[in-house]
Image (spheres, helix red, strand yellow):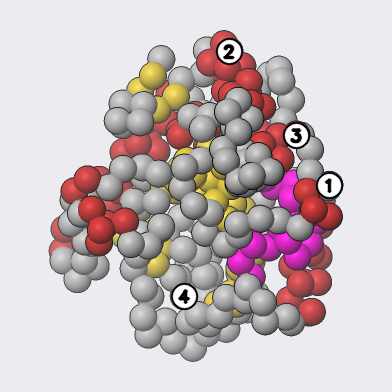
Amino acid sequence: MVPKTNLPSLTKDELEQFNRDGFIVLRDVLPTSTVRLLMSAMDSIMADGGSFNRDRENGSDGYRNCISLHPDFIRLLDHPRTLMAALQILGPHIHLMGTHAIHYRGGQAAPPKDPRWHTDIYGIPQDIGYEVVPRLAVKCAFCLSDHSQPNSGMTVLARGSNRLQRPFDVNHPEDARTVIVPALNAGDVFLFENRLWHAIGWNVQNHDRRCIMINYGFRWLKPLDYLTLDRQILTKMNPVQLDLIAGLDLDPQGYVASGRDGQVLNELFGSLRHSGAASLSPHGGMLQ
């Protein structure tokens, strides 16, 4: 659970980098013992082989809403370094948009036929236009395997494409120059926002790529892979984690219950601000 004092926070330079590039890398977030625990949890759900919420595409395999499949994933919802970063970027009025356990097999002889360049939260730019899409969500990708070598399945990113006001085109020379593949180790995390264009990587290494995605977004956005969670799962959560779960703002009749939305997160954000941590403005600037 997140402590109320000595909160970790992004520096002003790191926030400016995120604002400019659309992503940031946090090193050594998870210790080796936690990586091993989460790898074991992934082995367990993949071995069960259920079809519900299973997500298979271009050599990738895994499960959406993975916190409903194994309790060990729940600990990532309020990891101090990533949740505090999300609060600094989006502010306190956020909830969990979704979780995703990804297993991307190694030894691929050829790159994906369609790397599927895309932004997140499908449909928004098509509905309102690329030029006005705001920052709405932050996804935290916890690396459980080594991505330090080229072509190890790491997500391909287009640096600064969060500021594009048109669709990204990897065949356009100006866009192609922004393409990068971060070199990450097990235990590292990269955070990126919904407007950043990204694509599936190529894994020629002799080990599989495994990561856990935790997605935060504004409370008024509909979650992507759940509406409610089983009560047995909720009983395993602490107050911070519960505050992140969509639907718990509602009273028994289905109305939003005034005063119940994000109390704990508001307190954490207040503690961050009191400590002097900077945060991003919804309009893209910096709040001191």
State the residue position of label 3: 239
Disc 2 marks which amino acid? Ser
Mark 2 lies on a secondary structure that is: loop
Among numbered discs 1 and 4, the one appearing first in the sequence:
4
Q: Which mark is residue 235?
A: 1
Q: CA distance from mark 2 to mark 4?
A: 42 Å
Residue visible at 62% across and 38% down in the picture: 249
Q: Which residues are magenta?
A: 63-77
Among numbered discs 1 and 2, the one appearing first in the sequence:
1
Q: CA distance from mark 4 to mark 3?
A: 39 Å
In the rendered image, the vertical position of residue 201 relative to residue 95, given as above or below? below
x and y percent of residue 221 in the render? 46, 47
The mark closer to the camera, 2 or 3, is 3
Q: CA distance from mark 1 to mark 2?
A: 31 Å
> Which quarter of the image is occupied by the C terminus?
top left
Mark 3 lies on a secondary structure that is: helix
Q: CA distance from mark 1 to mark 3?
A: 10 Å
For the residue pair 47 and 175, the one nearer the viewer reads as 47
State the residue position of label 2: 275
Residue 236 falls inside the magenta stretch: no
The mark closer to the camera, 2 or 4, is 2
Where residue 211 sits, quadrant-wise, is bottom right
- The secondary structure making up most of the magenta span is helix
The answer to whether residue 16 is visible is: yes
Among numbered discs 4 and 3, the one appearing first in the sequence:
4
Mark 4 lies on a secondary structure that is: loop
Disc 4 marks which amino acid? Trp
Residue visible at 46% across and 55% down in the picture: 182
State the residue position of label 4: 202
Residue visible at 66% across and 55% down in the picture: 228
Left or right side of 106 for 124: left
For the residue pair 90 and 184, the one nearer the viewer reads as 90
